[in-house]
Amino acid sequence: MRHFLKLRFVLPLLLTALVSLLVAGCGGGSDGGGGGTDPAGVAPAGVPVFIDFTVRPEGETKQNIESLAKEIAGVDDLGGLIVEELESSAAEDGEEFDFEKEVEPWLGEEGGLFLSNYSAGNFQEIGAAFQVSNEEEAREFVDKQVEAKSDGSTSGTYSGVDYVVEKDETGTTLGVFDGLLAFAQSEAIFKEMVDASKGENLAGQETYASAVSDVPGDSAADVFVDIGGLIKEAGNEIDSDTEIFLDSVGIEPKQATAVASVLPGSKQIEIDLSTNLGGDNPPSGDASQLLGSLPATSVAAFASPEFGDRFNEGIDRIDAEGIPSEGIMPHRLKRTLKESGIDLESIASSIGDVGLYVTGNSESSLGGAMILETEDDTQAKNTVANIGLFLRSTGTPGITKISEGASGFSIRSPELGRQPVVAVAKGSRIAIGYGLAPTLSSFQEAGKTLSDSASYKDAVDALGDTPISVYVDGGSALKLATALMPSGPAELGEAKRYLQKVDYLALGSEAAGDMATAKLIVGIK
């Protein structure tokens, strides 16, 4: 925090973002007003990631942010706490700083951050802009901090815009223009921002405008990602097998974009996502009935509707392309498996919804299964029997018949771990899982399913009309993660204080045309 007044880039940006999203107006202050250019208007055209956020949340949004801060971190006045830390850091550096007098009067309503030039696992170009209601006061603040520095800095003018360059590793640069206080990781990037304000910029791109056209009006932050742009900047690094798989499900990642919006509630955090990554025919339908029927002991569970249709389409495409890296030539996959007794087309055509769940609270008790719903009992039983016959024909060792509780088989092998892999059928369901007891628990009667769990019911209610497709029990998931990583990264230990406040995670999704939308809810205890 102490570097805020030294005009470094990263910490000033993060702190201002915190002030934006969490301070909620710093207790009411003066009415700075909006003014200023759209921050996306100074982001160079084609940047792959842009984050837009509200600097002065008001009304219900402000109340919800304050409520979450109190519930999660036990902080009654988050804005006051952050400002106090800023001012204390300045005092430790021998500098005077009064946020309420020196910053709040000119700080506007919106801020934006862009990330670009992705290579070697990092973004090499970063820039940000914050709306200001009074350019002159903002410049006076910058000038005051520059004068207070002992290590000096340089100044310049570009296209009529005055700016200051830090004497640091990258030459962090900032200046005030077009109603914005702009930061850049380097002088060159700052000049790109000035050029963008006078010419082509992200705000003027149809791809961006279309993607953010339906973001919720009460969101605290919106994150835009040009997935195709990221892939291009990374050197188009998609291996051939991955490309075949994506093509098999109709996904064109190089043409895709995504937008995520954060909406704080008093007892939950909601993230709305929209993307065209789902391909020409993104998944739709409602598999919540299957999800609710999975074991109540599930740490995490997932369900997808009409899986068979998409599986069949994918198999057709993979069969047509082949898998060269595995020596499978085009038009040979389905034929080879059929000769071995596995009719993929017949299996796929009989499968409806699919579910997946994980149970356990330690490595030794870890288990789970994938559930496939078929058209009838005969199809389910025959499918499992044919898989067993195929495995026996390949000489797979350790196969044992199962007839109690369900019909099928299990496979035990040291390579598979402590528990067997199980494939069983009961009624019209097929369960393929790890561990006999966890797999058979998918056939539990009512009273022992997720739909009977109070937390699961809360998750369904929070999603409203959006059908639930993913559920995670917060407490159980944290317990399992802690058991699997007892001496894990220090960050996990620090995060546990806040993660233990998470009651559940719920994800629901829908589709319309070529757009898929999803809603993620993080419920707070």
Image: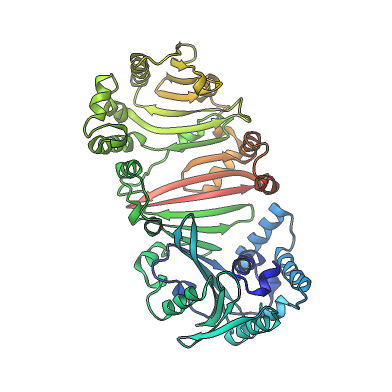
Q: Nearer the viewer, residue 444 or 464?
A: 444
Q: Nearer the viewer, residue 161 or 99?
A: 161
Q: Position of residue 237 (x, y in %)?
A: 37, 51
**As drawn, is 70 to the left or to the right of 512?**
right
Q: Nearer the viewer, residue 340 or 439?
A: 340
Q: Position of residue 454 (x, y in %)?
A: 61, 38
The residue sitting at 59% across, 84% down in the picture is 134
Query: How many callouts does the rendering have?
Result: 0
The residue sitting at 48% across, 73% down in the picture is 189
Indicate how the structure is coloured in the image.
Answer: rainbow
Q: Position of residue 399 (x, y in %)?
A: 44, 13
215 over 189 or under it: above or below: above
Q: Position of residue 43 (x, y in %)?
A: 45, 71
287 over 385 or under it: above or below: below
The residue sitting at 47% across, 33% down in the picture is 356
Q: Nearer the viewer, residue 319 or 119?
A: 119
211 over 147 or under it: above or below: above
The residue sitting at 46% across, 47% down in the picture is 466
- Residue 146, image quadrant: bottom right
- Residue 57, image quadrant: bottom right
Q: Pick the quarter of the image with the N terminus.
A: bottom right
- Does residue 490 appear anywhere in the picture? yes
**As drawn, is 11 to the left or to the right of 441?**
right
138 over 112 or under it: above or below: below
- Does residue 219 appear anywhere in the picture? no
